[in-house]
Image: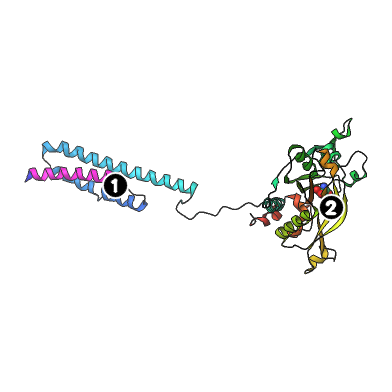
Amino acid sequence: MQANYRESMLDKVHTLIKEVNGFTTTSKEEIEAFRIKYLGSKGLLKKLFSEFKNIDAEMRKDFGQALNTLKKSAENKVSELRDNLENTKEYEAVYGDLTRPAEPIELGARHPISIVRNQIVEVFSRIGFTVSEGPEIEDDWHNFTALNLPEYHPARDMQDTFFVEKSQEVEKDMLLRTHTSSVQIRYMENNKPPIRTISPGRVFRNEDISARSHCIFHQVEGLYIDTDVSFADLKQTLIYFTKEMFGKSKIRLRPSYFPFTEPSAEVDIYWGLKTETDYRITKGTGWLEIMGCGMVDPNVLKNTNIDPQKYSGFAFGMGIERIAMLLYQIPDIRMLFENDIRFLEQFKTVI
Ligand code: DAH
């Protein structure tokens, strides 16, 4: 009886040690309950120590050791669980509760110039045009001379130029390109017809800054060269473009002059006169000028070693700011350069 009792007491302590070591929780309350159960003033260890006197002398050593192990294990367990709890709290303070629903990430906004540029590129890429680019610091040859604008040509005055470096030979003067037509020349010098390319980019003119004009702006140039390209091809391409871009396909071509095209025309689209704004921006006519165009002058083809007897083509050029201002009803071109966040964030939903 006595022997059995001793054995079972020792077994019980060993079972409790296992139980203690296996215990785990992340709840503050459960840790406290655990502490009270084992180490509290009316806890299990108190009770077991009070059994000590009933144990045979020869067993006391084993029993005592087992009880000490149990006590140490319980104490270690409590401090280990408390430490864990502290760490979790710190972790949550830093990273928050990882199980809660995520905060939506705020979207940035594309600049309206980029939005319009991308749209134009997209519309033309659908009919086989590829994008080409050229340098913003350009030489006179590509910006003027090759485009049928030799030295002393009066039309050079149409575009007030920022010169970077004057040279002995006019063709080698360096300047900030005044239009993206310079890319036409570069493209024709390096590619054989058929050519279908559009060239978006930044251009510079020595002009006063106002609500309607800026010394820095953006253009998209278009160029199509092949055998038998006619003015009718140009017109159809423009109708396609205005329909895709503005949802309007009524256009008119007004005779105009550009040195690099012959004949040349200015393209107006019929915007309508539905609102007060329509009246204001079309000056009461309903018509809006959106670009210049024409058949590539044979001299330009010659300047880039393309045979004008065999090939013909058309070109066009438009300002991106002007189109962005039309589409988004932006009253002042300067807003496009100020980078005021209150203006820019309005374009957030447009991808
Ligand atoms: N380069 C002209 C400008 O900046 C725009 C232009 C007009 C480009 C007619 C063309 C064109 O290719 O054919 O005002």
Is any part of residue 23 visible from this angle? yes
Which amino acid is tagged 1? Phe
- Residue furthest to the bottom in view is 274
Which residue does the numbered mark 2 point to in the structure image?
210
Residue 15 is marked as none
Q: Which residues are magenta?
A: 3-22
Q: Nearer the viewer, residue 131 or 78?
A: 131
In x, y percent, where is residue 232?
79, 56
Element carrying mark 1: loop
Locate the C terminus by quadrant: bottom right
Residue 23 is marked as 1
Residue 65: image quadrant is: top left
Residue 137, relative to residue 345: is it above or below? above
Q: Residue at x 79, y 66 (%)?
A: 272
> Badge 2: how crowded within 10 Å, few (<14), some, or many (20+)?
few
In x, y percent, where is residue 292?
82, 52
> Badge 1: how crowded within 10 Å, few (<14), some, or many (20+)?
some
Q: Nearer the viewer, residue 299 or 77?
A: 299
